[in-house]
Amino acid sequence: MPDEIIEKLVIRNIGLMLSGKIEQPIYEADTIIAVNGKITGWGAEKDMDVEGATTTVNANETTLAPGLIDSHVHPVVGDYTPRQQQLHWIDSTLHGGVTTLISAGEVHMPGRPKDIVGLKAMAIASQRWYENFRPSGVKVHAGAPVIEHGMVEEDFADLAKAGVKLLGEVGLGSVKDGRTARQMVDWARKYGIQSTIHTGGPSIPGSGLIDADMVLETGTDVVGHINGGHSALPDDQIVCLCESCKAALEIVHNGNERAALLTLNTARELDKLDQLILGTDGPAGSGVQPLGILRMIAMLSSLGNVPAEVAFCFGNGNTARQRKLDTGLIETGFCADFVLMDQAQHSGGKTLLESVQLGNLPGVGMTVIDGRITSARSRNTPPAWRVPETV
C-alpha cells in the first residue's frame, strides 16, 4: 500500500477564536491544526505540533470561526438559479463566509415533477449532482423532495436507500393538512430523513397559509422561517410555536425582521436560544443574498441585544447540532471549515465583536473548506482592516 498523502493545515496567529458552541462561544487559542480536512487540535502555538504543515496560514490576528451554515436555500442545479436568472450565486455566498448550504426543496426547477415517480427521481438526481459537484468547494446538502398526495411509506424508504436525507418544505406541495403531513413526516423520520415546514403566509401565488396549528400537528424537525417567508404569522402564534416546539426555530433573511426579533426575545425568555438557527430562504423573490447570514447575525446582535459571539452561534454551531452535521463547530474530528474575518474598515467599535453588535458586517478575509483554502479577501463584504495570508 502506498503511504497515505497527508495534508496538514496550520493556522497560527489567530486573534480571536469563536467556537460555534453557544455554551462557550470563545476559545482561548491562537492556533488550529487540521489533518486531511479534519480538525485535530487547537490552543496556544507553543503547545501545538506545527511541524510538517503542507499549508500554513498567518491569520494576522484576525478572528477565526467555524464556517457559516445557511439552513434554508432553494438550489436548482450547479451554481445557477432560474429564480433570478443568476449565475455563481453559491460562489458569491461563499464570499459571505458561508461554507455549507441546506436545501429546503429544489422548488424553482422549471417543470418540477409533482408525480411520485418524478419527484423521487428529481430528489435523487439533485442529491447526486451536488454530491458530485461542489460549487467553489461549498457543501450543498440537496435532494429535498416536496411531499405530494399519494406518497406511501415505501416511497420514503426508497428515497432514504438512495441517499436522500431531507424533505423540502412541507406545505409547498399538495399536502396542506396536518394529519396527512404528520404521517409522511413520521415515515421520513423513521428512515432518517429530516423535515422542515413552510411557516406563515403564502410565499408566491399558488402557495398557501401554514399556521401554528398545522406546524404543531405536523411535528417537523425544523420550523422553517418562523419569521415568515415572506409573511409572518400573528405574534401570538409565533410565541405559541416558541413555547411548544422542541424543534429548531429557523429565522431567515427573507422574512419579517420584527417577527425575527420577537422569536429571538421569546426564545431567550424560554431559555431556548440553542434552538435558533439561521437561513436566507434564497434564491427567492427577494433575490439572492450572499451576505444574508452575516446580515442576520449583525441584526439580531444589534437590535436583539445579543453578544455577537453568541449570535454567530445561530449561524454555525446551533445549525450544526440541530441538523446533525459534522461542521459548524470547533470540535476534534469535525470538518475543517472556517471563515476568517476582521472588523470592517472605519466601522464603529474597537473590535470585531463590538462592531458587529453595533450592526456592522465584518470583513471576510479567507474561507477554508475541508482544510483547503477556498477564497481569499471577500469581494462582497466591506474590506477588513487585516487579512490572513499563506506563508
Image (cartoon, helix red, strand yellow):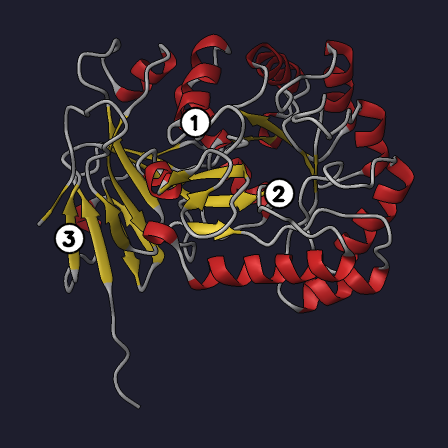
- Residue in front for this viewpoint, 42 or 154: 154
Q: Residue furthest bottom?
A: 1
List the residue tagged with mark 1.
292
List the residue tagged with mark 3.
56
Residue 388 in the image, given as x and y percentages of width and height: 16, 39
Q: What secondary structure is marked by label 1?
A: helix
Residue type at the position of mark 2: Val
In the image, 249: left or right of 49?
Answer: right
Q: Residue furthest left?
A: 391
Q: What secondary structure is marked by label 2?
A: loop
Q: Identify the mark nearer the N-term, 1 or 2.
A: 2
Is 314 drawn above or below residue 352 in the view shown?
below
Look at the numbered discs 2 and 3 and tell me whether their residues touch, using CB distance below 8 Å: no
Give residue 171's mark.
none
- Quick one: label 3, few (<14), some, or many (20+) residues within 10 Å? some
Residue 41 in the image, given as x and y percentages of width and height: 32, 53
Give the image quarter of residue 61: top left
Q: Residue furthest front?
A: 111
Give residue 107's mark.
2
Residue type at the position of mark 3: Thr
Residue 36 in the image, given as x and y percentages of width and height: 31, 64
User: Which quadrant, please, contains the N terminus?
Assistant: bottom left
